[in-house]
Image (cartoon, rainbow, N blue to C red):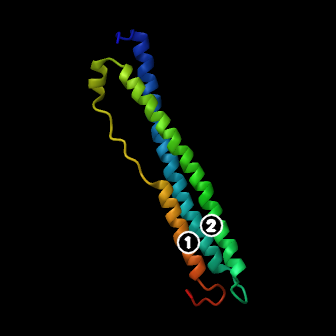
Amino acid sequence: MAEPTEHAHAELVVLYQIGVDDIEKAKQWAWNVTYQTVLAQGGVLALYTAYVAPVPSFWVRLVFVILSLAVTVVAHRATSDSVESLQTFRLRVGRCRAALTESSQTLMGPPTEKRTWPLRCLIWVTFVLIAGLLVLYRSGSGSGPV
């Protein structure tokens, strides 16, 4: 592979830095969605426990479980989009790094380890926990779980 010109090298370094920044933003977005989902799931549970009904109804519980499911599906979609973007950004950074001169690659050091976190799985685990609590909690009497 031919050595890139000074201008091409500068462009590659800028593209590399943009890719690294994009990776950090995608990671941050995925974690923010996960945190917000856990908070929203807790909010659904808090609303359910605050709901006072003369008789706990299967339909009321079903509505809250569906609300929790809706939050989970939206969060799963947003996290999936973030993970796909992350993979694209990592591919771009890898290509830029491969196109740089060997001396530039040496100066940058070895590529960082690519860790993946099971955020989508975590979102579904919180749904299962909240749905279980919704089903077990007796609303209205203040006496706690059934």
Label 2 with label 1: CB-CB less than 8 Å? yes
Name the residue beneath numbered marker 1: 130
Residue occupying image coordinates x 62% and y 61%: 71
Which quadrant does the N terminus fall into? Answer: top left
- Residue kind at label 2, given as amino acid type: Ser
Q: Is residue 76 above or below residue 15?
A: below
Q: Is residue 43 above or below residue 76?
A: below
Locate residue 43: give its quadrant. Answer: bottom right
Residue occupying image coordinates x 36% and y 42%: 114
Residue occupying image coordinates x 52% and y 39%: 85
Which quadrant does the C terminus fall into? Answer: bottom right
Residue occupying image coordinates x 69% and y 81%: 58
Left or right: 128 with respect to 97? right
Q: Position of residue 144 (x, y in %)?
A: 56, 87
Residue closer to the observer: 34 or 72: 72
Name the residue beneath numbered marker 2: 68
Question: Label 1's element?
Answer: helix
Kindly tell me whether residue 22 is visible in this rendering.
no
Q: Position of residue 127 (x, y in %)?
A: 55, 66
Kindly tell me whether residue 129 is visible in this rendering.
yes
Left or right: 33 with respect to 109? right
Q: Is residue 130 above or below residue 79?
A: below
Q: Position of residue 66 (x, y in %)?
A: 67, 68
- Kindly report the distance in space between the C-alpha atoms of the residues bearing marks 2 and 1: 8 Å
Q: Is residue 92 above or below residue 141?
A: above
Residue closer to the observer: 134 or 33: 134
Residue closer to the observer: 115 or 24: 115
Q: Which mark is residue 100?
A: none
